[in-house]
Amino acid sequence: MTRVILSGCSGKMGKVVASVIREREDCIVVAGLDLVKEPNSPFPVFAKPEEISIEADVIVDFSHISVLEPLLAYAKAKGIPTVLATTGYSDSQVKGIHQAAEHIPVFYTRNMSLGINLMASLAQKAAAVLGGSFDIEIVERHHNQKIDAPSGTALLLADAINEELDHRYKYEFDRHSQRKKRDKNEIGLHAIRGGTIVGEHDVIFAGHDEVMTLSHAAYSKEVFAAGAVNAAVFMAGKSEARLYDMADLVG
C-alpha cells in the first residue's frame, strides 16, 4: 500500500486526486498539506511541510508554485520521492527542480495526461517530416480561472517540437505587436481563456495548400489526477535520485 502525502489537498485538483485515491486499493492518503483545513477531513492536514509528523512513501503536489521550495526542502530532508503536478513554474524554479533531483527521485512533467504526452511524441514525428516547410502554431484553451499563460502543456508541446528541430525555433507569444511577416523559424503560442474549459490543445502544421492539426481535449480534471496517482504509485520505493517523467512511467 503506497502512503501518500497530498500537497494542495484542499484545492480543486487536490480534492479530485483524493477522490481518485479513495477508489483505488493500492494507495492511501495518510496526510495533507494545505493552509486551508477542510472540516471532517479523513486524514490530518498540516499547514507547513516541516509540521508533517506522519511517515509516507511519496509526496504528490497539486498546489501552488509558492509551495515548491519548502516542499522540496522537506522531501530532501526526509528522502521522499516527490511527484510535482503543479503548473506555472518559473525558469528558476524548474532549475531548482532539477537540482533537487540530484538528491531525491523527482517526477516532473507539465501535464499528467497520457494522451497529451502521446500528442507530444506525435508532434515530434510530424516536425521531423514537416519541419522547415510547414509553419507551426500551438493554440491552447482553458477555463477563465487559469492564471498562467501560455499553459505549461503548450510549452511542453513546443519544447518537444523544438527538440526535434535542434532548438532552431524561437517562441512567439505576442504577434499582435509585430508589424512584419511571420518568421519561418518560429512557433506561435496562443492562449484562450473562457468558461469552464478544462483543457484543449491544438498543434497546427500549416503548409502550402494543406494543414495538419493534432488535437487533444480533456473533459474532466480526473484525467490529470489519475496520471498523478499512477506516477505516485510508480515512484514509491524509487531510490535512484534523478528526474523522472511520463516516458519512464509508460516505457
Image (cartoon, grey):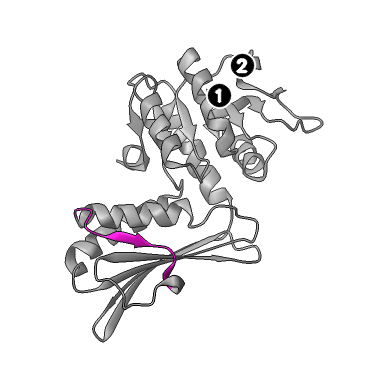
Location of residue 143 in the rendering, given as x and y in whole percent from the top left corner: 61, 61
Give the total number of marks visible in the rendering: 2
Kind of residue sitting beneath label 1: Pro
Sequence-earlier tag: 2 or 1: 2
Q: Main secondary structure of the magenta part?
A: loop
The quadrant where residue 204 appears? bottom left
- Graded by Cα atoms within 10 Å as few (under 14), some (14 to 19) or many (20 or more), the crowding at tag 2 reads few
Q: Which residues are magenta?
A: 166-175
Q: Dot 1 lies on which element?
A: helix
Location of residue 89 in the rendering, given as x and y in whole percent from the top left corner: 48, 42
Q: Which residue is mark 1?
A: 70
What's the residue at 30%, 59% (across, down)? 170
Q: CA distance from mark 2 to mark 1?
A: 8 Å
Up the image or down, 124 lies above or below 76; here it is: below
Q: Which residue is mark 2?
A: 50
What's the residue at 55%, 34% (across, down)? 61
Kind of residue sitting beneath label 2: Glu
* Residue 22 part of the magenta-drawn span: no
Along the viewing direction, whichever of 158 and 220 lies nearer the viewer: 158
Callouts 2 and 1 close, C-beta under 8 Å: yes
Location of residue 194 in the rendering, given as x and y in whole percent from the top left corner: 62, 66
Up the image or down, 160 lies above or below 48; here it is: below
The quadrant where residue 136 appears? bottom left
Q: Dot 2 lies on which element?
A: helix
* Residue 174 part of the magenta-drawn span: yes
